[in-house]
Amino acid sequence: MNAEMMGIVPLFRDRAEAGRLLARQLRDYAGDRHVIVLALPRGGAGWT
């Protein structure tokens, strides 16, 4: 099932564009050793 069938409107053209925009948002934190960036995949984290 693709995003269109699920009714999801893409925010970005592709992953590369999303990565560039994320990097731009985070650039002020570069070099700050007290910053940790975490990410969750779409759908969240699975539990076992």
Image (cartoon, rainbow, N blue to C red):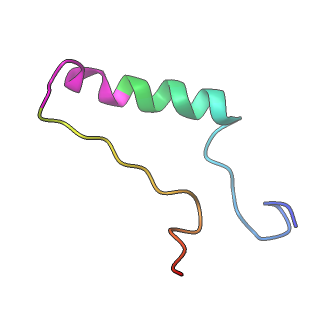
Note whether 19 is above or below 2 in the view shown.
Answer: above
In the image, 1: left or right of 23? right
In the image, 24: left or right of 46? left
Q: Identify the residue at the far top of this view.
A: 31
Image-quadrant location for residue 4: bottom right
Q: Nearer the viewer, residue 13 or 19?
A: 19
Residue 14 x %, y %: 70, 35
Q: Identify the residue at the far bottom of this view.
A: 48
Residue 43 x %, y %: 59, 68
Q: Nearer the viewer, residue 38 or 22?
A: 38
Note whether 10 is above or below 22 in the view shown.
Answer: below
Residue 13 x %, y %: 70, 35
Residue in the picture at 51% in, 24% down: 20
Residue in the picture at 88% in, 67% down: 1
Image-quadrant location for residue 25: top left
The C terminus appears in which quarter of the rendering? bottom right
In the image, 27: left or right of 41? left
Q: Is residue 31 magenta?
A: yes
Start and end of the magenta stretch? Answer: 25-33
Image-quadrant location for residue 42: bottom right
Note whether 26 is above or below 12 in the view shown.
Answer: above
- How many marks are shown on the rendered structure? 0
Residue in the picture at 47% in, 57% down: 40
Q: Nearer the viewer, residue 35 or 23?
A: 35
